[in-house]
Image (cartoon, helix red, strand yellow):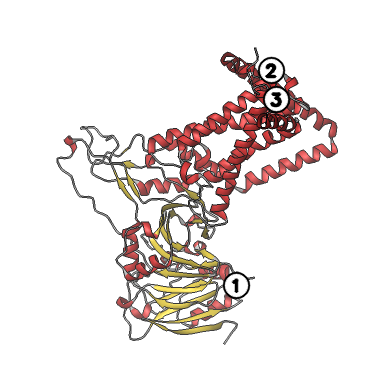
Amino acid sequence: MKVRWLVAPLAALLLVFVVSSGSVAACGGFFCGPVPVDQAAERIVFTMDAGTVTTYVQINYVGKAEDFAWVLPMPNVPKVDTAEMAMFRDLDRLTQPVYIGPRPPDCLRQRMPVPSMAMPAARAAESSTTVLASGEVGPFGYHVVTSPDPEDMVKWLRENGYHITDEMKPLIKVYTDEGLVFLAMRLKQDANASDIVPVKLTYEASYPTIPLRLTAVAATPDMPVIVYIFAKDQTQTLNYVPITIADSEVKFSPFGGNDYRQVVVQAVDQAGGRAFVTELAQPTSAIRPPSDPAVQLLFQQYPYLTRHYTRISPNEMTADPSFDIVPGLANVSNVHDLSNRPAPWSCSDDMNTFKPVAGSGPPPWMMAGGRYLQRFGEGGGTKAGLMLTIVALTALAIFRPALARAAASGVSRVWSRSVAATGAVGSSLWGATGLARLSRDAVVLLFLEMVVLQGFHEIEHIVQVFQRTVLGIGKGAGMLGSAFDIEPVHMIYNLAFLALLAGVYTGCRRDRSIIPRNAGKVMTLLSVSFFFQGFHTVEHVVKMWQYFQTGVNGTPGIFGYWVPVVYLHLGYNTALYVPVLIAFFLGGFHVIAGRLVSELIFGRRRSAGPRLAS
């Protein structure tokens, strides 16, 4: 079976083996010896094309030239080239997160030390074994080898000067069992260690995957990993948890420091240890112009750049993270400017006082709770429990129908009492306004108006999802969204629809003779719709509060932290519209509505149509 993922490793994932006759001062990668290497942030660049992925891997190495060796698993034979270190430095400069805190009080600004910023560094990394390709590029000579037998692969590596310990052999087997080939690279005889440059690899793959399982041998606790992906749209991890860091979770010191990296460590742990933060996701045209020629070319070739970041420990490296294009996600800026917020410090604070900035986002407990729910929801136990529950209920209905009917009757009684209480409250409120006195014709026309307006609104949401998922329009907002996609408009519409629904519900409840047929079923369907629209409106109230706090459209609301907003609100609108639509036709309102509209248009009736009853 074709391996559909890219094994383009981080420097921490590179299989750098030490030749048996010598020693090195530093190594990076899967296997470096018995002592894990203290590795700084590992950086890797992917570019994604149709069926092809290109990887740029940074290698840092300190040691003798003759001792350098680099081995890594690949899905197929790659085209090997070299790149320049400058591209990694330029990408870091353009994309690293920038947090601008509030201005400290004057009493704390007498001495303002300039915070230093450490740039992330990276460190490298005749039988059944077949040599598929070989050659030289830059300072390197290389071979691409494969073997169905991991023991024979280990033997080949050892015979060619690579030091493979017994504990490394099972890790070699992980990838030979998956049908991967191995790229082995050495410095040429006339090359020095100072000649080592990044490596560029191009090969067939559907999407990028990083072989983190192997890096556990040489990784350090909470090892930073930075991934840059150039593609046609934003990318997201497929099998790790995508998480967000709210500005409110980051604490600032009076002199410009912050604890962002520590917050990431905590957030990743809350998500189960396997998660990525999207630190930047922007069209390349919206990012500052790069200075490195190689990065300039990537900006010209690819319309979108995503930067992913995580901190991961060896015991958490149990799955290889994969990434793919996910259209429709909101852009993410790497600049977090809180300078206009009130300063949280007092004159008694010192330079080591770290405090959050008030009003900069959801409370940290809410963000943490969202990650724990994500972790719970992504777990196999949750899905398995739900499936077992469905199977058990089905079995109960088949083999114990009497018991199932009794349980259903109990649930129905509880539901009826809840609906009755809700209806009583609604009747009293609307009766006080006079809307309870709407005539039958008025209720029918309000029902028709509700069906038509919400039907168009539902189509808008469907078009929006189609634009983002099928057409690849990252900011698709439906047919009218470009003009009306702001939170206050959404809020006003939802309040208006809630009022229409309440008017129809109250009118039908006051006088069930208004309903031509199936009155009981119609009222149940309207109650279901009323419930969903009520909570939907609460969501928009929260979104409005977030909008006034941040000034940003598309705020997450309540559940938008865990479910993409575009899909969440399509679900809300579908859940409330389907019962309304069924009730309209099941109750026979469409017949009366058709007659009333015809009379209003063609003047076959002298009365003014909908009116208030005396």
For the N terminus, the image quarter is bottom right
Residue 17 visible at all: no
Kindly report the distance in space between the C-alpha atoms of the residues bearing marks 2 and 3.
Answer: 26 Å
Q: Residue at x 36, y 34 (%)?
A: 359
Q: Residues within 10 Å of mark 2 (few under 14, many from 20)?
A: some
Residue at image mark 2: 510
Kindly report the distance in space between the C-alpha atoms of the residues bearing marks 1 and 3.
Answer: 79 Å
Q: Position of residue 142 (x, y in %)?
A: 45, 81
For the residue marked with disc 2, what is the amino acid? Answer: Arg
Is residue 496 depicted above or below 6 in this figure?
Answer: above
Q: Residues within 10 Å of mark 3 (few under 14, many from 20)?
A: few
Q: Nearer the viewer, residue 506 or 280?
A: 506
Q: Which mark is residue 179?
A: 1
Report helix, strand or loop for mark 3: loop
For the residue marked with disc 3, what is the amino acid? Answer: Arg
Q: Does label 1 or label 3 sit earlier along the sequence?
A: 1
Kindly report the distance in space between the C-alpha atoms of the residues bearing marks 2 and 1.
Answer: 70 Å
Residue at image mark 3: 605
Is residue 592 depicted above or below 56 in this figure?
Answer: above
